[in-house]
Amino acid sequence: MNFKPECMATGIGSVPHTDPDEAVRFILSYFPEAPNWPQVPARGTEEGFINQFTAPLIELGIVVEKNGKQYFDTQQEQWGEKLARFYEMYMAAIEGDNAALDFFKFPEVSASGYYAFIRHLEKNGTGNARYLKGQISGPLALGLAMTDQDRRAIYYNSQGRDVLIKTLELQGLNQAKALGQFGLPVLLFVDDPGLYASGQSTFITLKREEIIIELNSIYETIKGAGALAGTHSCAGMDWSILFESNVDIISFDAFEYFSTVVSYMDEMKTYLNRGGSLAWGIVPTSAENVSALTVESLEKLWKERVRYLAEKGIDRQLIYDRALITPTCGTGTLDMDTAIRVHELTRELAGRISL
C-alpha cells in the first residue's frame, strides 16, 4: 500500500437530499479532492442498503419478496438449481464476462446517487479530485438483517452466507471498475456497523476468524480491480478483526469510540507499519454535538488524540500521512442544516490540520 491521504477530507455514505444530482453537487462542494457518491435514503425505502444488494438475487429467485418483505427461500424445490445458476453467473463475472458482472450491479432505483455521480463524472470530468470513493454494505450488516423463510438471520446459513459474500464481491468489483474508468485511484469502502456484534454475548456463534476470511475475500476482489479497500464501522467493536485483515483503510468513530480503538495499540502499530491508513471520523453526526462544537475545538481534540498515539510510540508523521478526515457516520438521517454543518466542519478541520 502506498496511500498517503495526508488528512484529506471525504464523506461517509448518506446525505439528507432527495434529488441525487443536488446530492452529488453537495458532496463535490465539500470534498472535491476525494468525493464519494451519495446515498440518498430520504427518497424512500427502495434506496435502502438491502435493496441495493438483493436485486440480482430476486431475479435469480434465491431471494423472494412477499407482503413487502424479502427473504432467502432455502426450502424451495428449485433451491439447488438456482444456487447452481448463481455460481455460474458468479464465475463468469469473476472471469471477465462483463454482461455477467453487470447483472450484479446496483439497480438505479436503489442507488440513484451512484448513477448521478457517474453521469456527473462522464459529463464534467473529475475536476480537482485525487481519489474517487464508493461504498457497499458489509456482510454482517446484511447477513444479520436478512433472514431465511424461518426468520433466521441468513448469516447463520452457510449457503446463504456464501451467496451474500460473493454478491458483495461482485458489487464491489463492479463499482471499482466503473469508478476506475475515470483514471483516478478508487477507495471502495465496505460499510459494516454489524461488526460490533462479534464478541457480544448475544452473538456468541460469530467467529472472528471466519469474519476475517469473509472480509478478505471481498477486499481481495476489490483490490484485484486496482482499488483500495476500506471498511467503515461507526461503533465499538473488536478492532483486531480489521487490523489483522487485508483492509487498506479502517474508518472509525474517533469522537465517541477512540478509546475502543486504542485498546488494540499493538495491532494498530503493526497495521500502520505495514502500510494501513485510518479514516478519522472525528466530526460527530448528532445535532446536539455538532451545535456545541467549533472547528477549533475539533482541532484541539485531534491534537490530543494524535499526542496520545505518539506517546504510545506511533510516529506523528506516519499518523498524518495515513489519515483521512471524515464525519463519524453518514448524515442521511439529519436535517439539512445539521448535515451542512457536519460537512463544513469536516472540510474546515481537514484544512487546518498540520503536524
Image: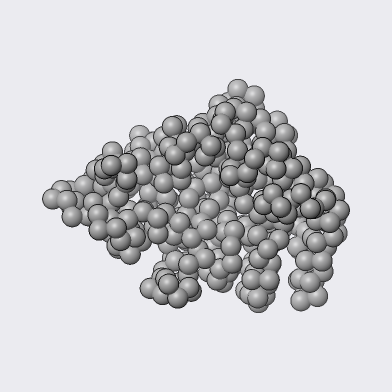
Residue shown at 71% from the left, 52% from the top: 288
Q: Give the color scheme: rainbow, by chain, secondary structure or one colour.
A: one colour
With 130 as the anchor, is 192 left or right in this view?
A: left
Q: Nearer the viewer, residue 296 or 326?
A: 296
Residue 315 in the figure: left or right of residue 60:
right
**What residue is shown at x 55% (from left), y 71% (from top)?**
238
* Relative vertical location of residue 301 with respect to residue 290 in this rendering, above or below: below
Q: What residue is drawn where x is 68% and y is 63%?
A: 256
Place of residue 180 in the rendered image (x, y in percent of width and height, measured from the top left): 56, 39
> If the image is split into quadrants, where does the C terminus sit?
bottom right
Say whether residue 312 is left or right of residue 171: right
Residue lying at the far top in this picture: please name it. 123
Residue 267 lies, in percent from the top left, at 62, 74
- The structure residue drawn at horizontal position 42% and vertical position 50%, both measured from the top left corner, is 168
Q: Would residue 104 be seen by someone viewing this image from the given angle?
A: yes
State whether residue 327 appears in this view. no
Q: Quadrant of the N terminus?
A: bottom right
Q: Position of residue 226 (x, y in %)?
A: 54, 47
